[in-house]
Amino acid sequence: LNEWRELVLNWVLRGMILLWLVILTWGLIGIYIIQKPAEPSLVDKILIGLCLGCALTTLVITFATGLGYKLRAALFLVILYFYGAVNLLLLSYPGEGRIFLLAFVALVAILFDLRRSLYALVLNFFTLAFITYLQTTTVLTDVVPTSSDYVKLINSNLIFNVLTPYRI
């Protein structure tokens, strides 16, 4: 089982390098070619920097096999969680943050065990609840949904939390 998990980790890391490159390329095209702003927004700059940092860290984790399986897997899972949470915080429910959080829970189950994936699920629930609270109480001034979006935001996060256990 451990050999299989390490093989899965290696393939997932290689796939994630490609995914980070696609996300980064699409983000840069969207900002600089499609939108053509005089100055990219702070959110755009943060997301591009975050994606670049995640891509570089994933690249290092992929080829630094001397770090050991558990450390490599844990670092990768932290990257997934962190990117998902920040993306959700900055882009709200239309962003792909919830998908990364879902992948985080599923990969914890695959790379470690189901018990740890339950902890990851609880962490996801509280992360989503906290970000929903921040976005619906105007604590965040730059990323605040319009009043008509409150129901969509809460509903979207509730559906995500209900469906997550059935995906792992």
Image (cartoon, rainbow, N blue to C red):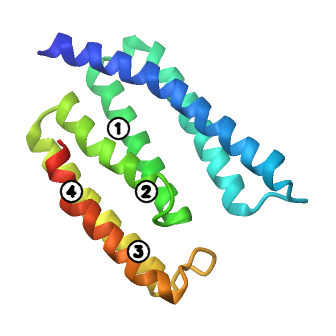
Task: From the image, tell me which residue sits under label 4.
Answer: 163
Compared to residue 95, the image places residue 49 above or below, namely: above
Q: Nearer the viewer, mark 3 or mark 2?
A: 3
Secondary structure of the residue carrying tag 3 is helix
Task: From the image, tell me which residue sits under label 3.
Answer: 153
How far apart in space, not on screen, are marks 1 and 3 (Cα)?
25 Å
Amino acid type at image mark 1 = Leu
Q: Earlier in the sequence, mark 3 or mark 2?
A: 2
Residue ranking furthest to the left: 115
Amino acid type at image mark 2 = Ala
How far apart in space, not on screen, are marks 4 and 2 (Cα)?
18 Å
Q: Between residues 93 and 72, which one lies in front from this camera angle?
A: 93
Compared to residue 23, the image places residue 3 above or below, namely: above
Secondary structure of the residue carrying tag 1 is helix
Label 3 Cα neighbours within 10 Å, binned few <14 / some 14-19 / many ≥20: some
How far apart in space, not on screen, are marks 4 and 1 (Cα)?
20 Å
Label 1 Cα neighbours within 10 Å, binned few <14 / some 14-19 / many ≥20: many
Label 2 Cα neighbours within 10 Å, binned few <14 / some 14-19 / many ≥20: many
**Residue 125, numbered label:** none
Amino acid type at image mark 3 = Leu
Residue 63 screen position, x and y as percent: 47, 13
Compared to residue 12, the image places residue 120 above or below, namely: below
